[in-house]
Image (tube, rainbow, N blue to C red):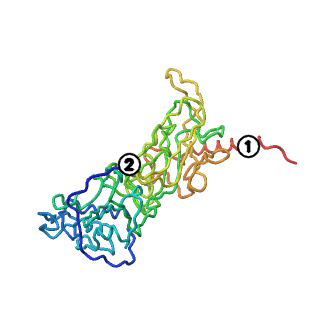
Amino acid sequence: MKPRAPLFAALAIATTMAAPASALDPITRDKILELASYSEGYSYWWGHGRFRLDKSDLGSCSGSCPDCTHGGSHGGDCSGLVGKAWQVPSPSDLDHDDHPYSTYNFKNDQTHWDPIDRGQATRGDAFVHNDNGAGHTYVYEKDDPWGDHWAYECKGCSWGCPHNIRTANDTYIVIRRRALDEGPHVDASFVAQWSDADPDPEAKAHFRVCARAPVRMWFEIKNTGADDWRDLGDSATKSGEAVRLGAPGDLPDPITGATRVSVADNANDLVQAGGPDCNDQPGCNRTVFTKAGLAGKAPADPGVYTSTWQLVDEGRGWFGPTMSMSFNVVTCPEVPGTGGPGGVGNGHGGADPGGAGGSSAAGRGGAPQATSGDASGGEAVEGGSCAVGGAPRRSGSSGWIAGLAFALLAGARSRRRTPARD
């Protein structure tokens, strides 16, 4: 059974006539919630909708609406807030007093919105009810639409306009504004990836590493979307504000044991769309996960293990290319006096991302390729202002030699396996 909740005592009824339908300007869900957030703390003002960016002149309300008294020139009622946040029927400055629709209109008309299934409610939609001459509406933010959820609302004379957790009984329906701008605002392209392990001479994986030995990986990615990337943690409210490198499926990565790596761990922790073409300082359009590398440890059991990652804007979705590195984990003799495995080299080979979508060569048939330099085919980014401090040099001599030796060895093996032809 769906949960029910008591109705708030003070509900808004507006008598303003509905505005005629016209073409709507597109708006993002982030913008709807941003506009709604400016109402927080303002007084309840029957039949109005006017707020300020600086949260000044909050006003006051006394009495029981509609027979209430308002002091000041800013505030709003429930439908005034929804109309302002949705910017319907046309763009309206926050500080301009507008009240184009009542809860009756939001409930019974479909001027610039449509009713949707309550279970499909998402950020920026509105809840509304209007029965027997009384109604209420508010902007839904997040959490359970059938239970406790966050909302922006102008609730009544005694409450004003809070940002709070509330519930809604079964008399409420959910409506969605038309002309929402729901296009992708975060996007990425692959640049390069590399590890401090040596290429695998057996051609079973990108790299070979001793069982239980430490290993590090780096992934370089470019912001090709419209929104900047950062990670504000629980304070994130907008697209691009909770960007992390994630393990698809949320299963622990077999090399690092992690499921998330924050962009805040990078030398460039603010990856700007259209920023300078560099990766080593805030504001660059590229970033490397991470400044110190993704630190991991090879599993104890020999075999081929693949470390796979993709960007995620937490709470919004996955985006950008899927990137993988594979490791041939082998048993190595222990180094005398250390109790640890002996090394199989410490080169700086690269992992070829392959073709479309930035997928690693590990996801394709055939032997993986080891490369050096910028695997994207663009300009080299080793050295100069875009160098990543502490990361292995992808175009250094040891990595290049290791890659060349690996390629030659793989080619020789391939030739030996090819039958002679007449």
Q: Which quarter of the figure has residue 136?
A: bottom left
Q: Do the residues labelled 1 and 2 touch (CB within 8 Å)?
A: no
Give the vertical position of 57 relative to 145 (above or below): below
Please state the horizontal and vertical placement of residue 16, each as a whole percent of the image.
Answer: 25, 75
- Furthest residue in direction top, as rendered: 337
Disc 2 secondary structure class: loop
Give the vertical position of 210 relative to 312 (above or below): above
Please state the horizontal and vertical placement of residue 178, each as a whole percent of the image.
Answer: 40, 69
Residue drawn where x is 29% and y is 63% of the image: 137
| Residue, disc 1 | 414
Please state the horizontal and vertical placement of residue 190, each as a whole percent of the image.
Answer: 52, 54
Of tags 1 and 2, the one toward the viewer is: 2
Relative side of 79 to 395, left or right: left
The first of marks 1 and 2 along the sequence is: 2
Relative side of 333 to 165, left or right: right
Please name the amino acid that badge 2 sits on: Met
Q: How far apart are marks 1 and 2 (CA)?
A: 65 Å
| Residue, disc 2 | 1
Disc 1 secondary structure class: helix
Please name the amino acid that badge 1 sits on: Ser
Q: Which quarter of the figure has residue 38?
A: bottom left
Q: Which of 122 and 110 is in front in this view?
A: 110
